[in-house]
Amino acid sequence: MVGMPVSLPFTAADIRLAAGDRSYGRGLDYVNAVDHLEISDTEVTANVYGSSEYTVCLVIDDQRLSGGCTCPYGRDGFFCKHCVAVGLSVLELGDELPRHLEAARAQQQAVDAWLQSLSKEELLAELRGLLDENRELRQRFELRAAAMNTDALAIRRAVMDFITPPRGEYLAYDEVYRYANEIYKAAAAIDDLIQGGGATDAIVIAREAIDRLSGPYDFVDDSSGSVASAAYELLAVHLRACQAAPPEPVSLGDYLAGLLLDDGCELHPDLDDYAELLGERGTAVVRERIVAAYAANPASWHAKYLRESMARAEGDVDTIIAIYAAELDDHGLNHLRIASELDGAGRGGEALRWAERGLREAAHPDQQLADYLARRYAASGRQADVLDLRRDRFQAERSLKVQTGDDNYRRIASLLLSARACHRALGTADEFRRYVAALRAEQKRKRNLMKILDQNGL
């Protein structure tokens, strides 16, 4: 066995970098609360006592120091104060580190030698003793045995027990990790069934489990995302089952489309993962159902999102334009989105016409639309059109002059700067200076406006 180097591959600075200053500072107070410190070649484990007893595991490699903890903050994937305390405890060993390492290696070697000395019957007796003492370990072995015997009924019962939350109980933030772990156990049990040759049954069990977990998690505080992450593992195991025993493509497409179209569903399969399994026939089913759902209810945000996503995947720009065109807004933003899509498709002429249409039709055109047109006109050398556009926009927003507030004043300055650039390009800078002089005389009582104009050289 390759030993851990006497000089650890991390320092206090590495711990601070992994944790951040706040967690590092708080971890200093927990160094004396570290117990059962165990150091192996690749990891460090320990218990840390705070408001509860937490288990910490630090993983050591040549690249970086990482850690996990059973506290709520650690479950969210952060290098918490308890991880800091364990890391600092290791560093505090100093010259004692070699002795700890040798003791750990000697203990492992002693266990290995003892196990090798036992007969098969003696090993079985020891194992049965452990299973009698440890209910969770016994359950794990029972499921492995059921999977190897392709006992789908036993696996299904266990999976449903795992994913069924405590009856009538709301799981608070610090309790959801345990429930998420149960969901991971369910996925592992289905995985074992696949390995045991029961992939077809595994598909059915996975789908039933997904159906139970696909709705909103109203019974848990899943702000950490732990339950959602575990639930997605059920989708992953469903995919693995399908890969091991490919289902009929049309039925698979129908099932996946149903998941995607259920706007109350929290689990959304990635069709790219299933592309080979779906083939042309299965993909066609998914497409037909999404198209029909959008046609039946184009106001549905969910159906619209799926239809647009599908059109993008297919490179169908005209469908994307039709989706946006069905909901033209008073600010011309969808006109601008259409123009952007057309530009991306190399259809610049159509893009320009849609943007001009937005400026004409929108009740309150957004400045982004005007800026887009100004750029297009300028790129084509149409400076007179740029000036007309800026002048019209400024006239349309003359109401800004009677409003107060720095935001309005900055808006005026922005419009004026755009207009000045156009006048300079056309050689009519004197006309612009006269306009600004008249504006300043008219609005001279607005001291903040004058200040902002000065700051912008106007």
Image (cartoon, rainbow, N blue to C red):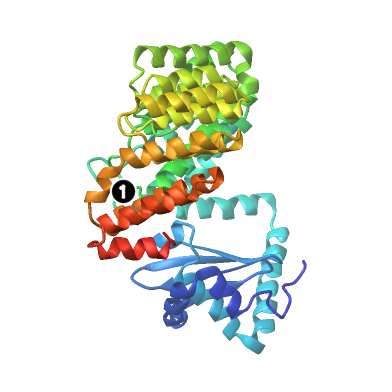
* Residue 266 drawn above or below residue 70: above
The residue indicated by pointer 1 is: 221
| Left or right, residue 438 beside residue 60 | left
Q: Residue furthest bottom?
A: 95
Where is residue 270 drawn, in percent x and y?
54, 30
Quadrant of residue 441 within the rendered picture: bottom left
Nearer to the camera, 445 or 251: 445
Where is residue 283 drawn, in percent x and y?
57, 16
Where is residue 75 drawn, in percent x and y?
45, 57
Q: Residue furthest right?
A: 2
Where is residue 173 drawn, in percent x and y?
32, 54
Amino acid under label 1?
Asp
Q: Is residue 206 visible?
A: no
Quadrant (top left/top right/bottom left/bottom right) for the C terminus? bottom left
Q: Secondary structure at mark 1?
A: loop
Quadrant (top left/top right/bottom left/bottom right) for the N terminus? bottom right
* Residue 287 drawn above or below residue 36: above
Residue at 57% from the left image edge and 14% from the top image edge: 282
* Residue 168 drawn above or below residue 437: above
Q: Is residue 219 visible?
A: yes
Nearer to the camera, 351 or 399: 399
Nearer to the camera, 297 or 381: 381
Mark 1 neighbour class, 10 Å CA radius: few under 14, some 14 to 19, many 20 or more: some
* Residue 22 drawn above or below residue 166: below
